[in-house]
Image (cartoon, rainbow, N blue to C red):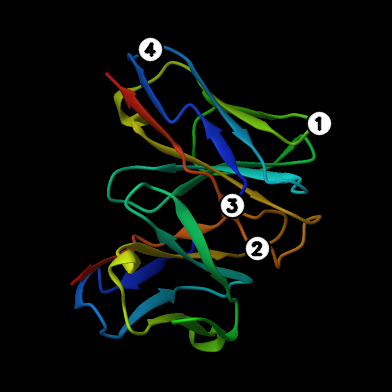
Amino acid sequence: GIQVEQSPPDLILQEGANSTLRCNFSDSVNNLQWFHQNPWGQLINLFYIPSGTKQNGRLSATTVATERYSLLYISSSQTTDSGVYFCAVGWGAGSYQLTFGKGTKLSVIP
Amino acid sequence: ETGVTQSPTHLIKTRGQQVTLRCSSQSGHNTVSWYQQALGQGPQFIFQYYREEENGRGNFPPRFSGLQFPNYSSELNVNALELDDSALYLCASSSGDRGWDEKLFFGSGTQLSVL
């Protein structure tokens, strides 16, 4: 099956700093989504981005499908950005199955 | 607010018992997927239902089964519980008809502990 690797596994930031999270995947995908899991376990969908670039406030994401990676940018980080960020990819036909990476745990300190 | 609701939020069972978890999809969504998330790991796909039929299944044994109802709500049933079944169980819904440009919206999950 497809492999999804996220880096770094852990990240500690001072409030106000910027960061870049990376997701590499081993095969062609037709679905790529970024999620934020808050400390209470809720998974929030940040972006659906199988290719191209999108921005939503302080967050933006870029996927280069031909090179099999995606980047999530967080600017001017806030303590509420803390949690685990997951990249998830889908491939093949007939199913919405997503394969998740192991996540990047982000801690933003005041 | 995603609109996907799960119940119960927490559950404690003993090995060998059976459990049923419930999920109400976001309004207008006809596809529901279930994921298992072990501590410190990313969610793993269990199965998906589209218009009341199973549409895909991950690497989980048959004792994991599901149902989707005409109102698109769903149940996950696990028989003969094992200690390794302890995890957060997440339900996700999506809209559309087998399209690929579908965002998944997750509920808050059910934390299952098997003793």
* Marks 1 and 2 on same chain: no
**Vertical position of residue A78 compared to residue B87: above or below:** below
Which is more N-terminal, label 1 or label 3?
Answer: 3
Q: Amino acid at mark 2?
A: Gly
Q: Quadrant of the C terminus of chain B?
A: top left
Which chain hosts label 2? A
Nearer to us: label 4 or label 3: 3
Corner quadrant of residue B100: bottom right
* Marks 4 and 2 on same chain: no
**Vertical position of residue A86 compared to residue B73: above or below:** below
Mark 2 crowdedness (10 Å alpha carbons): few <14, some 14-19, many ≥20: few
Nearer to us: label 4 or label 1: 1
Which is more N-terminal, label 3 or label 4?
Answer: 3
Which chain hosts label 3? B
Which of the labelled discs sits on residue B16, or is there none? 4
**Which residue is the site of mark 2?**
A92
Q: Which element carries disc 2, helix, strand or loop?
A: loop
Nearer to us: label 3 or label 2: 3
**Which residue is the site of mark 1?**
B70
Q: Residue at x 31, y 73 (%)?
A: A78
Q: Which element carries disc 1, helix, strand or loop?
A: loop
**Which residue is the site of mark 3?**
B2
Question: Along the horizontal axis of the image, is A96 left or right of A18?
Answer: right
Q: Marks 3 and 2, how far apart in space?
A: 27 Å
Q: Which element carries disc 4, helix, strand or loop?
A: loop
Q: Marks 4 and 3, how far apart in space?
A: 34 Å
